[in-house]
Image (cartoon, rainbow, N blue to C red):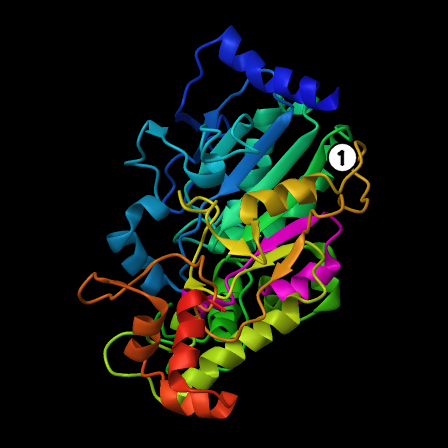
Amino acid sequence: MAQVKNLAQSLYPCSAQKLDQDMKLRFLGNVSVTCNDGTPAGYYLRESKGSKRWLVFLEGGWYCFSKENCDSRYETMRRLMSSTKWPQTKTGTGILSPQPEENPHWWNANMVAWCVCRNVSCAAPPAGGYAFMGSLIIREVVKELLAQGLDTAKLLLLAGSSAGGTGVLLSVDRVAEQLEELGHTNVQVRGLSDSGWFLDNKQYRCTDCSDTISCAPTEAIRRGIRYWNGVVPERCREAHEGEEWNCFFGYKLYPTLTSPVFVVQWLFDEAQLTVDNVHLTGQPMQEGQWRYIQNLGNELRSTLKDVPAMFAPACLSHEVITRSYWMDIQVKGTSLPRALQCWDRSFHDDGRSKSPPKGCPVHLMDSCPWPHCNPTCPTIRDQYTGQEMNVVQFLMHMGFDVQKMAQQQGMEPGKLLGMLSSGS
């Protein structure tokens, strides 16, 4: 009966109206809350009448932490700091897609997304210069959505990728508290953080902190939190008094959260490797780099082992939930959309946790040790030629010594290559 009811709710908008496929741009009514350059802040909305589920998505886009690199960012990536040239509509892909074939569990939800133009941790601009009003923008968006149907919702999923994934971890409790303060205790708030679980580890090769690419994550955040006038969640701030920069790293922030969060994280995240100064093009990889990459995977596994709801494939990639191929990635035979559906079923109607149904896993992490040892990983392309590479070609391109590794594993090189090709 419950399945029939869910089907009826899903079909209702299709029969009652022509569904708008695209999300439409809306600017905030509160004009004092702005993008980095003072232009109006806004968001994209696609309503789904009849649905009690809302998905609010925070876009990624890296960050800047000083006037110099914010100026550079403004010149080269203005859409991330200004709404001046935002298009009137956006088409959702992956978990934002309105097509059930691409998005089987969330296609019929009310969809909200907005471009970066903010730093999600901050409450007010520094003296002069750029404005960093991320937390105020989120607060204003939630306030406006309440008047558009969020007030009668059952579930709000705050999702985000990359810097937006970090933003989910920083903001999910604040959104839950805002709705509770306004008396909307009927709305369950959960988080979905994609590729935002960064580590504050030691770089492979230390460099000066001259820009956002070469600067070690800890130093960049230390400088940024002062420049942004950054605000972090209260419980995390109390746990790291005087060193609030710790709250930008998922494994330190997560234990202080009260809202349920599902973490999606590539074990070999390209953005993490970039800031760690491991560059995967050009010359064959040195043995030290290879060890560093394997250690990175082990460190990520260690930080994620106690996260009850997570999906961590052994792939070299960055971001996934808004990719059109997001249904294809599997860990231990379970796809990401399926894992998220299982997570959804692990809650009672009132939001309390329960055990997920048998055969419906929510804690999924690859145990194989190399990048792309999972055969469902996204395609790798040579960044110089654009040619697709299979796992064996990729490993050889990286300078991987098949013969030496086979010897260490006590097997013939041909057998090891066969196992790698099949993803064993």
**Corner quadrant of residue 106:** top right
Where is mark 1, residue-wise? 180
Q: Is residue 369 left or right of residue 343?
A: left
Task: In this rendered view, identify the residue nearer to me: 301 or 240.
Answer: 301
Residue 59, given in percent of the width and then of the height, sits at 45, 45
Image position of 20 (left or right of 13): left
Callout 1: SS: helix
Nearest the eye: 183 or 367: 367
Residue 184 versus residue 362 in the image, above or below: above
| Residue positioned most to the top | 16
Q: Is 108 positioned to the left or the right of 23 in the image?
A: right
Is residue 9 visible in the rendered structure shown here?
Answer: yes
Residue 359 lies within the magenta run: no
Q: Is 270 part of what is drawn in magenta?
A: yes
What residue type is disc 1 on?
Glu
Q: Residues within 10 Å of mark 1 (few under 14, many from 20)?
A: some
Q: State the residue at coordinates (68%, 44%).
A: 343
Q: Give how far across and how far down residue 339 sits, in percent.
A: 62, 47
Instruction: Report if residue 81 is visible in the image.
Output: no
Which residue corresponds to the image point at 61% horizontal and 21% vertical from the top-left? 51
Q: Quadrant of the N terminus?
A: top right
Which segment did they paint magenta?
249-272
Q: Can you give x and y, in whole percent of width and height, for residue 8 in the image?
A: 63, 15
Q: In which quadrant of the rendered view does residue 415 lie?
A: bottom left
Q: Residue 207 placed where, x, y %?
A: 37, 83
